[in-house]
Image (tube, rainbow, N blue to C red):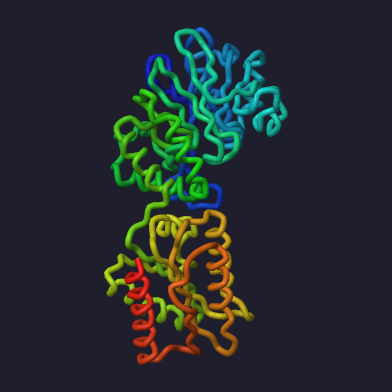
Amino acid sequence: MDAVLIKENVYWVGVIDWNLRDFHGYSTSRGGTYNAYLIIDEKITLIDNVYAPFANEMISKIKSVIDPSKIDIIISNHSEPDHSGSIQEILKYATHAKIYASGPAGVRSMMGTYHDIEVLPVKTNETLNIGKRTLQFIQTPLVHWPDNMVTYSEYDKILFSNDMFGQHIASFNRYDDQYELCILIEELKKYYVNIVLPYGAQTQRALNAVKDLDIELICTSHGAILKKYIKEAIDAYQKMSTYQKENKAVVVYDTMWGSTEKMALEVAEAFEQSGIETLVRNVRKNPQSDLIYDLMDAKYIAVGSPTLNNNMMSSIASFFCYLRGLNPRDLNFVVFGSYGWGGQGVTHADRDLEEMGHHRLCKPIRIQYSPSDERRAELKEEIKKAIKEFQDKE
């Protein structure tokens, strides 16, 4: 329950959620953390707090350093409950504390409205002196809520980055160099893709706003503090926020009696034999958040669905709802599926992908009942032909 010293007079007072397995609807198989930071200066400052069920644990950590009643300033970089859910518990101790959060001058901030408290709104490049340190505020709207901001301490060369560069990993390890880089970047990407992906332009503006700061530590609101792999994290954000693509296809499908699955495997082979890295994913065997992670940098998506009650399978429709909300850009798609007598499932799936703004490789392909070996071979050739025609136009 003790605080963790991360720099002189700067402490991590966050908590570890070992049992977190779902966050904003995406799968968090490694658990997570809610990070908060305590600065001991002439004015005792708490940056962010934690999800309400963990309030007592955070307060215990603060007590290991100072009496919580001595907190003068609370900075909330974001009003969402995982960042600010313990504010009422903190205020029971820090009764005189002033609260600062993102918001235009003269207008009540989201933090104030959300928690029904008095908040001093701040804007980009406004500063707050707390003694040796002068803290600088930089608004980062829609990364991932309108009220998101980051706080920079030039004295410590620390960027308190809020949701930017976060990852969901439950561990006593506080720093990035205590993890394998591949795991750290995987979790950083999963977090971005399932939380921030629709806001690439806003993320670009946020990156530009902090690029010239002298940063030794990035203190995130979730996961590891970055010190060794800052460049790698920024590079990953740069790539993801500009929607850069790889020569990759993801075949996403569901099946009732195995017929559409047989088609999916033929479609996958068509992409693979066309020189395209290919992944095959059954939507009921893989979390939707992992499917979005796979699709993040893919150039192609192939969707297979049987027809059920004159429509696509409900599992595919559910995936489309998730896909539509996060909106990975510029996918080139093909839709396929088996049917018994109607066959409308592929038509509806094809329509939905077009409405999302993606690009059709070929007309939807339907096969009645279970595909014969001959029809499966024809299917593969149809897809290969469509891929080649597309590649010739690029």
Looking at the picture, tell me which residue is in the foreground, 35 or 155: 155
Residue drawn where x is 30% and y is 46% of the image: 182
Give the percent coordinates (x, y) of residue 205: 47, 37
Quadrant of the image containing the C terminus: bottom left
Q: Can residue 52 be seen in this snapshot?
A: no
Residue drawn where x is 65% and y is 30% of the image: 111
Residue drawn where x is 70% and y is 27% of the image: 108
Q: For this view, does 79 lie left or right of residue 196?
A: right
Give the percent coordinates (x, y) of residue 84: 59, 31
Give the percent coordinates (x, y) of residue 282: 44, 69
Image: 340 above or below 322 = below
* Quarter of the rendering containing residue 101: top right
Number of marks in the rendered image: 0
Image: 201 above or below 291 = above
Give the percent coordinates (x, y) of residue 168: 44, 43
Q: Can residue 307 be seen in this snapshot?
A: yes
Residue drawn where x is 36% and y is 39% of the image: 233
Image: 83 above or below 41 = below
Q: For this view, does 76 lie left or right of residue 176?
A: right
